[in-house]
Image (cartoon, helix red, strand yellow):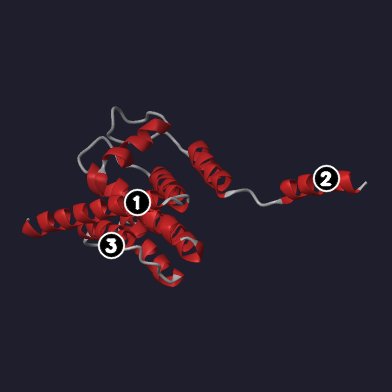
Amino acid sequence: MRRGAGPARRTAAALTAPPPEPVFGAALAAAGALAATPALAHVVAPGTPFSEILHHPAFEPAHALPLLAAGLWAGQSGGRAGAALVIAVIAGAAAGAGLVALEAPPPWRSLMVFASMLAFGGLCAAAVRPPWPVAAALGAAAGLYQGAVGTLEPFRGGTGDYTADQVMVAAVLLPLAAYQVAARARAGWARIAIRVAASWIAAAGILLLAFTARL
């Protein structure tokens, strides 16, 4: 009887255990994909399907690099700070898109986006472990400008703007993907590679800030 009880207990424990982080991330990604509407954007043609939404953040550094750097730093930090950072970025992006919808976009949009590249990239490269309130505050501020820039700045004079829900797809998928990569970097070389990548993002932020200051 005791021999049979062991496997039964293990099976019950496996069924009642919380899902691993990849399942959580995949569920969020699937939810975003299913909720996405046609993208009224400038890539290829307006009104085309979900893949159009991903083209812009994938090829526009001002969108992709700050979100990826935030996710890398969150995964590197782990714990409450990492979770707070990702959640704050997503919530901030929603708030920024909402401000644009209310015709009250925040000022200094380009400067703040480039500054977030420098901040998140530099903090990840230095492997700084922040308290969770600090991580949440930085994430909310960066997300606010990402949401505003994504719905407004790049598309004036184009075929149309991204709507708030379309911007949120990128704001969810990119930092979550980077978070998953950094959180699972156990080998020493992998952690170094993440810090090197983050330092490149920080360097790009410095370069863009310098160009902006000269204009």
Dot 2: element: helix
To which residue does mark 1 refer?
194
In this rendering, the answer to whether 132 lies above or below 10 is: below
Quick check: 95 left or right of 28?
A: left
- In x, y percent, where is residue 97? 36, 53
Quadrant housing the C terminus: bottom left
Gap in angstroms between the C-alphas marked 3 and 1: 15 Å
Q: Nearer the viewer, mark 2 or mark 3?
A: 2
Q: Which is nearer the eye, 109 or 19?
A: 19
State which quadrant residue 214 falls in: bottom left
- In x, y percent, where is residue 131? 43, 72
Closer to the N terminus: mark 2 or mark 3?
A: 2
Gap in angstroms between the C-alphas marked 1 and 2: 41 Å
Mark number, residue 119: 3
Dot 3: element: helix
Badge 2 crowding class, 10 Å Cα cut-off, few under 14, some 14 to 19, many 20 or more, is few
What amino acid is labelled 3 in the image? Ala
To which residue does mark 2 refer?
8
Question: Which residue is farthest left?
Answer: 214
Q: Which is nearer the eye, 20 or 166?
A: 20
